[in-house]
Image (tube, rainbow, N blue to C red):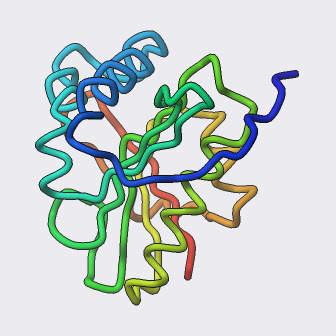
Amino acid sequence: MAQPLPSLSVQPARPADYAEISELTVRVYVDGELGSAGYVPELADVAGRASRADLLVVRDDDGRIVGSVALVLAGDFGEVTSSDDEAAFRMLVVDPSARGRGVGELLVTACLERARAAGKRRMVISTDPRMTVAHRLYRRLGFTRLPERDWSPMSGIQLLVYALDL
């Protein structure tokens, strides 16, 4: 079992982090077969995400980014949100070398705390059916499925929706 990373904390990403976040996000999705080749440009566009979401990162003791997420408190980048009372997060990634050490949970918990602080009443996320490890984390944190809101961004891609009342 992987050892916990000491003194983990979530921090806002800086523009100097964008290339590292891009590499990590693309690598996790491509190596995990979680996104099509057509999705790679969006995964790699960290500056574009940063203009529409709050980018959060977790670093290891050497300063290397081992996790990242885009928290959407307003706007259409959340895609799955249906009202101003809802927040979303997208592109949650954890470096394979840091899995099992609480990085994903720390990022999700930070998103929940920031959404509550912003006055949001619900976190709504969409996820690929193949992301079973993430689904276990979401259920453990209290998210429930909203199958009536499942959706398809394009032909051949069906996304599951989970929500947590804040």
In the shown orientation, is residue 18 left or right of residue 58?
A: left
Q: Position of residue 16 (x, y in %)?
A: 23, 34
Residue farthest toward the top in the current orientation of the protein? 31
Rendered residue at 15%/32% (across/down): 45
Residue nearest the observer in this picture, 31 or 2:
2
In the shown orientation, is residue 159 left or right of residue 154?
A: right
Using the image, determine if residue 131 lies above or below residue 80.
above
Residue farthest toward the right in the current orientation of the protein? 1
Q: Which quadrant of the figure contains the C terminus? A: bottom right
Q: Position of residue 73 (x, y in %)?
A: 30, 71
Rendered residue at 30%/63% (across/down): 72
Residue nearest the observer in this picture, 48 or 128:
48
Dividing the picture into quarters, in which one does residue 78 lie? bottom left
Q: How many marks?
A: 0
Using the image, determine if residue 144 lies above or below residue 25.
below
Residue nearest the observer in this picture, 21 or 17:
17
In the shown orientation, is residue 124 left or right of residue 151?
A: right
Using the image, determine if residue 137 lies above or below residue 166.
above
Q: Position of residue 165 (x, y in %)?
A: 56, 80
Q: Position of residue 102 (x, y in %)?
A: 71, 42
Rendered residue at 30%/61% (across/down): 80
Using the image, determine if residue 121 lies above or below residue 96.
below
Residue farthest toward the bottom in the current orientation of the protein? 119
In the shown orientation, is residue 152 left or right of residue 143?
A: left
Q: Which quadrant of the figure contains the N terminus? A: top right
Rendered residue at 59%/19% (across/down): 96
